[in-house]
Amino acid sequence: MSDQETLFTPTRPYLARGIYEWICDNQLTPYLLVDATQPNTDVPLQFVKDGQIVLNTAPHAVHQLNMSNDAITFSARFGGVSKNIYIPLVALIGIYAKENGQGLFFDPTEYDGIQEHTPKEETNEPTPEIKKRPSLKIVE
């Protein structure tokens, strides 16, 4: 594999976390612009317009915010009803401050050709355990 073919992890999760922190450090309101049509995206559909939704992720507006390398998750209230939100990073279009619009919008092709990690569906079937035989080695 040549240097040009080296595969890197997407920059989106790292940049999103950095911009989020910058917005909060400056006492601004972080908004996420999300493509609600992406697979596995779980957002309140009644607020989706033209396939997109804007979500306020200020610390006082959300609970248990987690920005991992795969997805952004949190719970928030919409119309008085609590909802768990799941946003795969491929669905994140941008993150910006409500007050001044400063932030970052992402390259829509960044995830092209990258296999997405999708959450495993839970089943009631037990996972078979692979048992290894114990082995001992004499060290002198």
Image (cartoon, rainbow, N blue to C red):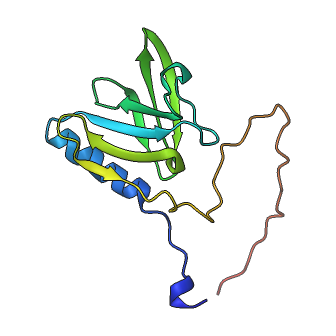
Query: Taking 31 as reference, is 1 left or right?
Result: right
Residue 13 versus residue 92: which sits nearer the camera?
A: 92
Tell which of 65 and 128 is nearer to you: 65
x and y percentages locating residue 35 in the rendered image: 51, 41
Residue 126 vs residue 115, the one in the foreground? 115
In x, y percent, where is residue 20?
Answer: 29, 44
Q: Residue furthest left?
A: 26
Q: Position of residue 4 (x, y in %)?
A: 51, 86
Q: Farthest residue in the front direction? A: 50
Q: Where residue 2 sits: x, y (%)?
A: 56, 91
Residue at 51 percent across and 89 percent down: it is 3
**Residue 4 in the image: above or below residue 117:** below
Count of marks overlaid on the render: 0
Which residue is most to the bottom? Answer: 2
Residue at 50% in and 66% down: 9
Residue beneath the point at 34% across and 44% down: 95
Which quadrant, please, contains the C terminus?
Answer: bottom right
Foreground residue among 94 and 6: 94
Specify the quadrant that holds the N terminus: bottom right
Q: In the figure, is residue 83 to the left or right of 31?
A: right
Q: At 63% across and 65% down in the image, what residue appears?
A: 113
Relative to residue 39, is residue 111 depicted above or below? below
